[in-house]
Image (cartoon, grey):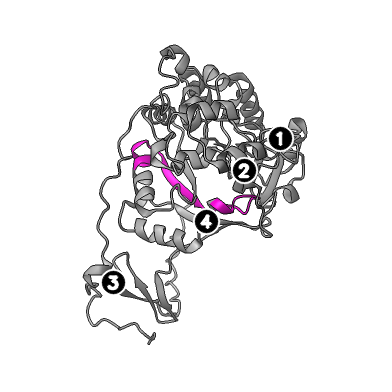
Amino acid sequence: MLSGVTRPTTAMNTTAPADTVRTSPEKSPFHAFVPAPRGGRGQWADVPEADWNSAKWQLKHRVTSLEQLESMLTLTPSERAGVAVAGSKLALAVTPHFFSLIDPDDPNCPIRRQVLPRFEESLVLPHEMADPVGEDAHMPVPGLVHRYPDRVLFLVTDRCASYCRYCTRSRVVSGVGEQELRTNFEEIYAYLKEHTEVRDVLLSGGDPLLFSDDKLEGILKRLREIEHIEFIRIGTRVPIFLPQRITPELCAMLQKYHPLWMSVHVNHPKELTTEVRDALGRLANAGIPLGNQSVLLRGVNDDAQVMTTLVQKLLRCRVRPYYIYQLDLIKGSSHLQVSVRKGLEIMEALRGHTTGYSVPQYVIDAPGGGGKVPINPNYVLHHDRERVVIRNFEGRVFEYPEPRDYPSAKPAPLPMPAAECV
């Protein structure tokens, strides 16, 4: 008998103490869908609708300098110093759409913490790395990472619509990092044709959706010509940073290359504006399955109610919460790190307290190239040859018997069919 676990005498329907049963959280102020407000201080209030809804206008008017920031926000000393650091680490660039979600007077705004540089980025701890998940060591061809047996990561560009300050690939992304991404497209296509074990290709970078429809289609068409590649995925944050890019024309083009999947990246429910919701809806209507990958970030989503609101809101956008990533050990990221203990607490607050469709898998991408490792709360209290003792989301304890090793019974021989008359 497991110490501390009482074997129930009934069908294990014992009731946990009242204080162990969580109730559903109240709706967050970010639960509703609202349009992007054109900036906390209205700096884009007079922009014509046609311009604001243009992806080209959004990219042309990204916030990229200290002067722009100071005219729009009350910067902290750390943010002001961080802009100088950004010039040699990871460029500053934020689309007007995403920037308009920032609270200009709150230095702890969860949107702000994701995209504005801070001086803390210059503080590198001994365990932090430029390439924390070991991609460079698994790159047989420039721009192609082959770490898992049947799938590859195809880095098609080093540019994004906006730059996340915790970017795993900050060494190569944005053009100011310590390395340069030199993707050799023809060598990659040749490698993929030769390696018939590859059935899944993930396009990432940078962000593939920054390419024109024609250029992106050229890549998809070449991949579809390789018979053993069964499906293609696109990793992108463009629908969130730049929802104006998700046009009917883009969706119609993507629809031609099914099975095509897409992983988006949303960390906080405030990011899911009406524009983002509609962009995701256009992709879903084109038959593209959507999954979300969040990164657990201090001061952004390290809160059970925030994460619950996020995953529920994602489902309303027809996006399946897929992963919650423990933050990779990227250089200068310690100010955004959250403990694994906290991550497990958040997972416990989700499991059983909201629909299973909205519960993502919590993973650590093992440092140095070990791949994604699932991290789960301990629901198995004891396991031996006779039984498994488990607890549920309410803290109630249950027992499930292990099947015995019964000798296999040999089936009786079937009667032989009668010989046909000739």
The residue tagged 2 is 199
Sequence-first disc among 1 and 3: 1
Q: Which residue is drawn at 53% across and 29% down?
A: 70
Question: Of callouts 2 and 1, which one flags the residue occurring earlier in the amino acid sequence?
Answer: 1
Residue at which label 4 appears:
363
Q: Give the range drawn in magenta.
A: 313-335
Work out which quarter of the rendered image holds the N terminus and state it: bottom left
**Camera-side mark, 2 or 1:** 1
Within 10 angstroms of label 2, few (less than 14), some, or many (20 or more) residues? some
Separation of residues labelled 2 and 1 (CA atoms): 33 Å
Say what secondary structure mark 1 lies in.
loop
Q: Residue 176 shows which numbered tag?
A: 1
**Residue type, mark 3 in image:** Arg
Query: In the displayed structure, would residue 17 be above or below residue 130?
Result: below
Q: Looking at the picture, which amino acid does disc 1 mark?
A: Val
Provide the secondary structure element on which disc 4 rests: strand
Magenta-drawn stretch contains 32: no
State how far apart marks 4 and 3 are (Cα).
Answer: 26 Å
Dividing the picture into quadrants, the one containing residue 365 is bottom right
Residue 396 numbered mark, or none: 3
Mark 1 → mark 4, Cα distance in angstroms: 29 Å
